[in-house]
Amino acid sequence: MRRYIAILVLVCLLIPLSACKNSSRNEIRVNKNIILQRGFNISSDSTELNTSAKGTVFIKEVEGNPEEVQIVASIEIDTNDRSGVTFYIAKDWSISNITSSYPENESQRIPADYIDIWTTSDPEPEWSNRIEIGRDRNYVPTIGGTGTIVIDLILDKEVATKPETFNIMVAVGSDEKEGVKIIETDNTQISIPLTND
């Protein structure tokens, strides 16, 4: 009987120890390399449309410096909206990847067909890139719908002076007043300091 109790005690001691050993090997880090984050929420309140973008900007460090950004946003575009959702990216940052599910639940639609990326040739722009989702350049309403957008950015390697802030602008909505078609009726700017000064 003592032998069985000794084996049982030994097993009870070894199980927690082996669990600790496995958890350290498979340790998962939450928000790895993320040093700052900022949320945003914009909707086409100035119009009768229901277009919106709500998300978070994550600033990631590489070798101790803020050199990567990830923007994750849930978007909704009204079926009568001609403008959709637009992200303006500040100079000194390049787009490395875009992942999109817009328009969700539309199996016959290809998300890449609903995204346009524009880059300026201006040597000193405020915004170097513009990402348009669900915009029709013929001023015709698109299909509308919902989706999730993930935009990955990296700091340009040629930048002589690293920026002190990261800036984006998110714009939504469209309207028509006295025969004039208006795009991006509502917008918000997000500015995140990158230095501790």
Image: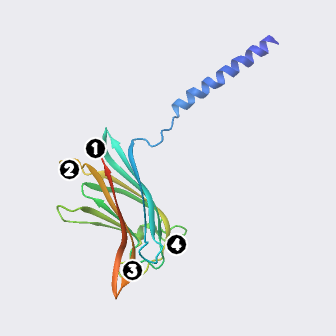
Q: Nearer the viewer, residue 127 or 157?
A: 127
Q: Nearer the viewer, residue 6 or 129?
A: 129
On the image, the x and y values in percent for residue 96 come to: 34, 55
Q: Quadrant of the N terminus?
A: top right
Asked if the residue under mark 1 is in contact with the one under mark 3, i.e. CB atoms within 8 Å, the reply is no
Of labels 1 and 2, earlier in sequence is 2
**Along the horizontal axis of the image, is 145 left or right of 156?**
right
- Which residue is outermost to the right? 1
- The amino acid sitting under disc 1 is Thr
Give the CA separation, mark 1 to mark 4: 45 Å
- The amino acid sitting under disc 3 is Asp
Instruction: Give the residue number, with chain letter if any, for mark 2.
Output: 159
Instruction: Give the residue number, with chain letter if any, for mark 1.
Output: 195
Give the CA separation, mark 3 to mark 1: 39 Å
Give the CA separation, mark 1 to mark 2: 16 Å
Give the CA separation, mark 2 to mark 4: 42 Å
Image height check: is 105 above or below 142? Answer: above
Asked if the residue under mark 2 is in contact with the one under mark 1, i.e. CB atoms within 8 Å, the reply is no
Please state which of the two labelled residues, at mark 3 or mark 2, is closer to the viewer: 3
Instruction: Give the residue number, with chain letter if any, for mark 4.
Output: 108
- The amino acid sitting under disc 4 is Gln
Please state which of the two labelled residues, at mark 3 or mark 4, is closer to the viewer: 3
Q: Residues within 10 Å of mark 4 (few under 14, many from 20)?
A: few
Q: Quadrant of the C terminus?
A: top left
On the image, the x and y values in percent for residue 75 come to: 46, 65
